[in-house]
Structure formats: C-alpha cells, structure tokens
Image: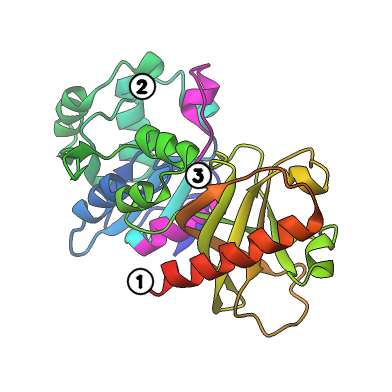
Amino acid sequence: MAIYHSIDEYLPDDRGCRASLGFFDGVHLGHRAVITGSADMGLRNVVLTFAHSPSKALGAPFQGLITDNRRKAELLTQAGAEDIIFADFGALRDMSAEDFVGKILVEKLRAKRVCCGFNYRFGKGSEGDVKRLIELCAEHGIDVEAREPVTVDGEQVSSSRIRELISSGDIKRANKMLGYRYAISGDIAGGNHLGTGMGFPTVNIPIGGELIVPRYGVYASKVTVGGREYIGATNIGVHPTVGENDKPLCESFLLDFGGGDLYGSYAVCELCDFVRDERVFGSFDELKAQIDADCERIKGIMTE
C-alpha cells in the first residue's frame, strides 16, 4: 500500500487501475461497499479522495470529521485500498466534468473501472452526477459501477447521519453504521496528573481541531497502545470538577493496565457504549466514588 499527497505524485500502473471515488469520511459501510465493489482481478485498487473536506472548502455547514487522514488511511487499507491519493480539492474544484474524466481518470490514473456512491458529484460546481460520469467514462472505455445506498435497521447509512449519532452519544448505533467501533486516535499527551492522585492514572489523547466531538460524558471503551488492547473508562469533555480545559479531551483510565510510561505512544481509543453525561461533582471524593461506580458498570458492559 502506498499513500500519495497529490495526484501528480501518483505513478500509474501500466495495466491501469480500478478507481474508487469519494471523500470517504468515516469509511462506513456504504463507503466500504464502493471500495470492495470496484474489485477486479489484475487492476490495482486506487482510492482517490481529498486531504480536506470539500464541503468546508465550499462554505457548506461543517459538523466536523469522523476520521483524520491517518485513521482514514488505515480504514481504507482495511477495506481493500492498495493505493490512496489524498488530492488537493482546491486544485480540482474548478475543473469541468469533462476535464476531470479526461485529465484525471484517463491521463493521471489510467482508470479502467470507476466505482462511486449513488450520489457522487464531480466537476466545477458539482455539475457532474453519476449519469454524467457514466456517459463521459463510456467515451474512454471506462466501466462505471455506482453503488446503491446501504441501510442498517431500515435507515440509510451516511456520514452526516453518523456525525449526528456521535454528537448525541448514540455511539452503539453509530458503530453499527460504521461497521467498526468509532475511535479517537493520536499520540498520548501529558495531563495534570489529578487522576493519578486519585488512583486512576489516565491516557490522554487530544481531539483534533477538525474532528467531531462526541457527546460529553463517560464511555466504555477499548484502548489499543503498542499492539495491546485494554478496557477503558473514557471521559470526553472538559473536566468541570477539576477546572475546565480550553478544549475537550479524550481521557481514558485503563482498567487492566499493569503500569508503565505510555507518553508519546500512538493510541487508538474505540468508544463502545455511552455510560453517563459529564457533570460537576461537589468534591474529589464524590468524583472518585463515581469513577469507581463507572468502572464497575463498564466491566459489566464489556463482558456482556
């Protein structure tokens, strides 16, 4: 697998490729259907996505991202991507639909097959839709496969719906639509060590500036560090009892951690279930008692 940070960096395979097109924020079940649906023997599976949100660049309402580019690349690879191109949306936004197909899909990628979602748009001002993509690609002998919507429990899977679920704390339903557990990942940062003083040393992962922030509160989680997985009691929020932070944090107490220094390590915190809202406590003793109760509840959740 290779990652490219511009289309110009990409060196096409002489045999051509199958190109999966989309922003793929979250790499949810619908996105995975696009990527796996483009499978074809003998052609390299190339994903053409963007480094930054096209919606935000176009001034549309921006709720935040489900995944940063590092996490997205991991998920795209798991879904079957062999090469990933993080293109600059600004370099393509004024390109006509015809030029996008001719200059990007044909000349740059040498695509033999294209796969996209049913609502895919392309070209300046989003002038091109799936029907137009099929027409233009046919002129160059490129097959197009547009995937139909994927539903979960009768509801259509979409990134916007998943963002709503994450924001409201309905993480179990969000996870069903994603097809995996929603995660916050990054390098472990130092904290104020108040948790350590109460007997609950924690792992702190900063929440990236463009990432959507889950509903403030405590979650049952699984935290992976250095290839090992731990059960976590994770707090998302600003810690009002100990003095509010400027920005929300993802702070996890690892219930089955044997000790050691994890600062600077890369960690993935997967949220499994919402336990309770974040709230202010009258004292540290009251907070400590609640954390004890949270941990007992989380042990039960994770053994169900």
Please, what is the three-letter code of the amino acid marked with disc 3? Phe
Disc number lying in front (1 or 3): 1
The secondary element bearing badge 2 is classed as loop
Nearest to N terminus: mark 1 or mark 3: 3
Residue at 18% across, 45% down = 153
Seen from the viewer's position, the closer of residues 245 and 184 is: 245
Image point 72% across, 56% down: which residue? 287
Label 2, label 3: how many angstroms apart (C-alpha)? 17 Å
- Disc 3 designates what residue? 86
Q: In this view of the protein, which residue sits in the foreground, 181 or 159?
A: 181
Kindly check if marks 1 and 2 are in contact, taking CB atoms under 8 A apart as contact. Answer: no
Q: Is residue 213 left or right of residue 279?
A: left
Q: Image point 68% across, 85% down: which residue? A: 258
Q: Residue 274: x percent and y percent?
A: 47, 52
- Please determine whether, in this image, residue 236 is positioned above or below residue 50: below
- Whole-percent x and y of residue 74? 47, 60
Res. 68 in view: no
Give amino acid for label 2. Answer: Gly
Residue denoted by label 2: 123
> Magenta segment, which residues?
53-78
Toward which corner of the image does residue 256 lie, by quadrant? Answer: bottom right
Type of residue at label 1?
Glu
Check disc 1 and report the residue beneath it: 304
Residue 120 picture quarter: top left
For label 3, the SS is strand
The earlier-in-sequence mark between 1 and 2 is 2
